[in-house]
Image: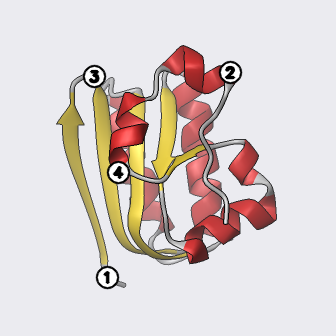
Amino acid sequence: MDLSITRTEHGDRTVVRIDGDIDVYTAALVREKLDSQLYEGHSDLVVDLTGVTFLDSTGLGVLVGRLKRARTLGGSLRLVGSAERVLKVFAITGLDKVFEIHPDLGSALRATGDLAEITPVTRRH
């Protein structure tokens, strides 16, 4: 159960980087860390999944729940990911149409709320 979660601030955006597997064993910790950011007022989140090596349905459920919570708070949750293994999970489930998935951190940080809601930037393989 090697999982690392770090947080950095980039202006008004909070970047949460996750490294390792997000699965039934680690999903509760991911949920706790993302919820703590939302409850502390960091409602514009960028979740960097470039270091994620495995993502299961439990992990997807956590991300969907945090997306809903961020939107309820008037914020957003963008994802960063480039690993085909992880992106394929989003594509198979159709969640690539629900989440904004950026190929790199820079593009996620440059995305504006209004533009992103109209034309999501999604990378598909």
Give how far apart the Cα atoms at labels 3 and 1 are: 29 Å
Residue placed under numbered mark 2 in the picture: 118
Report helix, strand or loop for mark 3. loop
Give how far apart the Cα atoms at labels 1 and 4 are: 15 Å
Marks 4 and 2: in contact by CB < 8 Å? no
Which of pointers 3 and 1 indicates the residue nearer the eye?
3
Instruction: Name the residue type under label 1.
Output: Asp
Q: Earlier in the sequence, mark 3 or mark 4?
A: 3
Q: Where does residue 26 sit, x and y in percent of width and height?
A: 44, 72
Q: Earlier in the sequence, mark 2 or mark 4?
A: 4
Crowd band around label 4 with a 10 angstrom C-alpha radius: few (<14), some (14–19), many (20+): some
Report helix, strand or loop for mark 4. helix
Instruction: Name the residue type under label 2.
Output: Ile
Marks 2 and 3: in contact by CB < 8 Å? no
Q: Earlier in the sequence, mark 1 or mark 4?
A: 1
Which of pointers 3 and 2 indicates the residue nearer the eye?
2
Q: Earlier in the sequence, mark 3 or mark 2?
A: 3
Residue placed under numbered mark 1 in the picture: 2
Residue at the spot x=20%, y=35% of the render? 9
Residue 74 makes an appearance in the image: no
Marks 1 and 2: in contact by CB < 8 Å? no
Give how far apart the Cα atoms at labels 2 and 1 are: 37 Å
Residue placed under numbered mark 4 in the picture: 33
Residue 12's label in the rendered image is: 3
Marks 4 and 3: in contact by CB < 8 Å? no
